[in-house]
Structures are given as structure tokens and as C-alpha cells.
Image (spheres, rainbow, N blue to C red):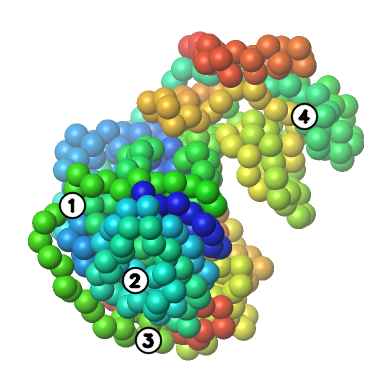
Amino acid sequence: MIEVLRSGLATSFQDRGRFGYRNQGVPLSGAMDFYSALLANQLLGNSNNLALIEFVLQGPKLFFHQAQKIAITGGDWKVTLNGEKVSLNTVINVPTNSELDIKGSKHGMYGYLAVEGGWKLEKVLDSFSQYGSITAKSNLQKGDKIKFNNSLKSTENKHASVGFQQNLFGVTEIEVEKGPEFEKLSVEQQEEIFTAELTPSKDSNRMAYPIEHGLKLSAKEITTSPVQPGTVQLTPSGKLIVLMRDAQTTGGYARVLQLTPMGINQLAQKRPGERFKFKLIAL
Amino acid sequence: MKNQLNIIPFGHQCLLIQWKNKDPQQNIIKTISFLEKKHNEKILELVPSYTELAIYLHEGVNQQDLLKTIKNEIPISSNKNNEFSGKIYEIPVCYDIDKGIDLEELARSKNRTPKDIIELHSQVTYHIHFLGFLPGFPYLSGLDPKLHHPRLESPRTRVTKGSVGIAGNQTGIYPSTSPGGWNIIGQTPVDLFSVNEDPPARLKAGNRLRFKAIDKGEFEKISAEVKNNNYQIRTSND
């Protein structure tokens, strides 16, 4: 069992997402950066869809009442175990009655903490992902106690570790495809959108990353239509918004681009102020 | 009838069918049941809207192959009759001014009395096209043009669960408390979404809906019934 001593900024349980309810208006949710989440589970030999703890910018402080194998991924987080610095992207053996403190990170936005065998949690609508009006709580809170799912532990020893994820954090070009309303942009705008220096705004969250672009762009509203994580919307007033995992299932802004699955992970890890460009790939 | 629709890829794992005719609701309903019958094993989820249908595919399904396959298979509805015939939900709404906080302002700007607004809003049978925006939120058509009204200039950070609002040519119900920019004219005590029900959304696309004006006393009575889990949304067939 762990006990939450400090919750961090917006720490939540996430898995691959809540599938099968989008036609009832339920967002997909799921880990912002699937790539790092998958890595944390794989280091521990867990199945890919086990829930993990996701944190953003400022991580949680947790007390481990029992010994447990864990893995932390998703950035270069400053992590201490009982005051001693520990390594990321590898298996960590946490002894009984330990304090794990996940502080800030120089790179990346979202981090993941997986435990061997996962957590004892109840699924809501077939998913562990916490989301406002679906699950009882939308975030981990100070004082929460969560049990480990010891029945799923495997017996093999794990020694795997991986290096810094250059393809995730080092990219300056994020791959996109044309969206349904791409042709509504003028020829000029269709070029500019791929040469402009872009950066996520400070208002970025699990629902959407508004993008600062410095361009003269605009598109008329559309009849409300399906949208998905990675859809790049353009508003009549010129705002460029990339929808993320907790996005609505339908929207009324022009869908000019669509990020690739890896592009969503890469953008999720970009901080406000960090520069990138969109790169068009053929479908 | 040809060229009535487009099918385009929308990202890596999704095909989008776009209908070009004005009111393709019947085509969408037919297409959903066709796809569920014929290609169910390839499909993760189907999400309809007013004029489109998103086909989200399972990982590993070849998008281009499926596009070619379904291109000539999508059923074309020759039926000009686009009337909705699904059952009608009766949604009780309290239009009191402390619940419909924008009702008086809306009435003023339309040069009508609040009573006129309530009448115009509750005498229509609305069509439920699809659910989106929030879990369980119905996209309705049929709002009387006399009630069309732009969104609030700056959205509220908190709109109470059950609020009934008007934005542009649409009316809708907030199934949960959320930020929002609709003009609020009333509130329903009814739950439109509950994770403990199957399906969790109480309203179904393809069906119809009417609002019924209730007073504060009835609002409290129904609220208590909803809380005790013994309220059923009334339905009828016409």
C-alpha cells in the first residue's frame, strides 16, 4: 500500500483509455504520453494496459507501507528514495516503510510511476483513468491510500533499463497529417503553418494544448463534428488548439491537422516556451 | 444519388464518412447498423454527428483497405422521409428565474415575456442527433428560430448540472457541472448520465425529446426521487 503525502500538481491514475463510450460523449482519457507509460509497465514486465500514476511538472510524495518494485519514466525527474537519489527508466526496489519524493524535471511535462503487478483499483466504464464527471475523484489527493495488486506479480528478476528518450524529448518537428478541413486554409496559410515556430501556451492541460503561433490564421466554425486526441483545431479568432487525451468527442472548430500517434506523445512532453514545427507527412 | 458522401482518412486509425445532403440522419443510422453487422471486428467505436460518422478502427486494421471495401457498400437511403420516429423522452424543467438565470435577459432582448420563451421552448418535439461535448450531452435540433440567440460573450466557469440552455440555433442540457457559454433558461432535476447504469447515457441518439415546465415544488420532489434512485424518465411514442 502507498499513502499520498503530497499530491503534486495534477496527479492521476491513467491507463490506455476508456474505449466504447465516445458515442455517449465520454472522452477517451488515458496517459498523455503513451510511449513513456508503456515503457514504465514494460520495465516491470506488466501488461501494457495496467494503470499507472501520471504526474505533471511537480510530482507526488508517497509513503510505501510495503516493499515494492517500481519504475519511473517520462522525463528527467529529480527523485529521492528515503533521501537518496534514484535512477529513472529502470527498476527500483523500494523497501518497506520508504518515502519516495518526485520533484521537478528539466525536460518533459508528464511522468509515470508504475508498480509491479499494478494497483488494486476499480474500473469505471471499463477503464482506470480518472476523469472529472466519470470517476469519483479526478486526481490523487493527500491522504489517499492505494493498495498494490500483488496477485499479478511475476517471479522473474528484472534488470532492464533504457537511456534518455531522444526521439521523445529531442524532437523539434512533430508529424501531422492533413485534417478534414485542411483545404479550407488558403494556399499561403497551408505553407505558413509548417514553417512557423510554435510553442504550447501556459494554459495547456489534459484536454488541450493551445498553440502560440504568431501567424495570421482563421477558419470558419463547422457543424459540430467528431474530433479525437491529436486533432488540431483552428478557431475563427485564429487560435490553434491541439486536442489531447481528455478532449471532447465532438467539436465545432475547423479540424485543419491531425497529429500522428507518436506526435501526440511528443507534444504532450513539450513545455510552454519550447519551440517546435509541424511537419506534414502523407497519409 | 452518387457522390452523396465522401469517405476520408482522419488520422491513422479512423475513417470519416461525410454526407453532403442536408439532413443525413437516416443515412447515418442505416450506415451504423450496416457497419456493425458487416465490419464489427475491425471497428473500435462509431461516433456520429449531424453530418458525419467517425469510424475508429482497431490497431492493425488497414485503413486504406477498409476504405476501398466500404466505398461502394454504404447504404444510400432513397427514403426522402427524414422524420425521426424514435420514442419521446419527457424532460421536466423548472424555468424559475433562480434556476434559469439568463431567462429574463433573453426575454428582454427578444421583446417577449419569460412566459413566451418558456412556451416556445416547451411546445416543440426535439430530435436527438448525437451525444457529445460532455458525457450524456444531447445535440438537439428543432429549436424555434424565435429563440435563436448567440452564446454568452464570456463563458461561465461553472454551469450547474441539469442546466437547460440556448446557444445559437441549439438548445441543450448540461448533464454535469462544467464551464459553459450557453444562455441558461432553466434546470432539470433528472440525471442524464450515470456510470452505474447501462448504458450510462439516459438519452439515445435517434430518439426525440420534449421539455415539460414544472414548478419548484415538483423540482424538489423529482430531485428527491432521483436521489433515491426511483425516478424514471417518462417516454411516449407521440
| Amino acid type, label 2 | Thr
Label 1 and label 3: CA atoms lie apart by: 34 Å
- In the rendered image, which residue does mark 1 sit on? A153
Task: Specify the label residue A170 is tagged with.
Answer: 3
| Amino acid type, label 3 | Gly
| Amino acid type, label 4 | Lys
From the image, state whether disc 3 or disc 2 is nearer to you.
2
Q: Tell me which label, 1 or 3, sits earlier in the chain.
A: 1
Is B181 left or right of A261, judged from the image as shown? right
Task: Specify the label residue B99 is tagged with.
Answer: 4
Residues tagged by mark 3 and mark 4 found on one chain of the structure? no
Residues tagged by mark 3 and mark 2 found on one chain of the structure? yes
Q: Tell me which label, 2 or 1, sits earlier in the chain.
A: 2
Label 4 and label 1: CA atoms lie apart by: 53 Å
Circle 2 packing at 10 Å, graded few (<14), some (14-19), many (20+), is: many
Which residue is found at the position 32% from the left and 53% from the top? Answer: A66
Q: Is residue A108 above or below residue A39?
A: below
Secondary structure beneath disc 1? loop
Circle 3 packing at 10 Å, graded few (<14), some (14-19), many (20+), is: few
From the image, state whether disc 2 or disc 4 is nearer to you.
2
Percent position of residue B157, x then y: 71, 50
Secondary structure beneath disc 4? loop
Instruction: Read off the chain for label 3.
Output: A
Label 3 and label 4: CA atoms lie apart by: 52 Å
Label 3 and label 2: CA atoms lie apart by: 15 Å
Label 2 and label 4: CA atoms lie apart by: 47 Å
**Nearer-the-camera pick, A41 or B198:** A41
Contact between labelled residues 4 and 2, with CB atoms less than 8 Å apart: no
Circle 4 packing at 10 Å, graded few (<14), some (14-19), many (20+), is: many
Task: Specify the label residue A73 is tagged with.
Answer: 2
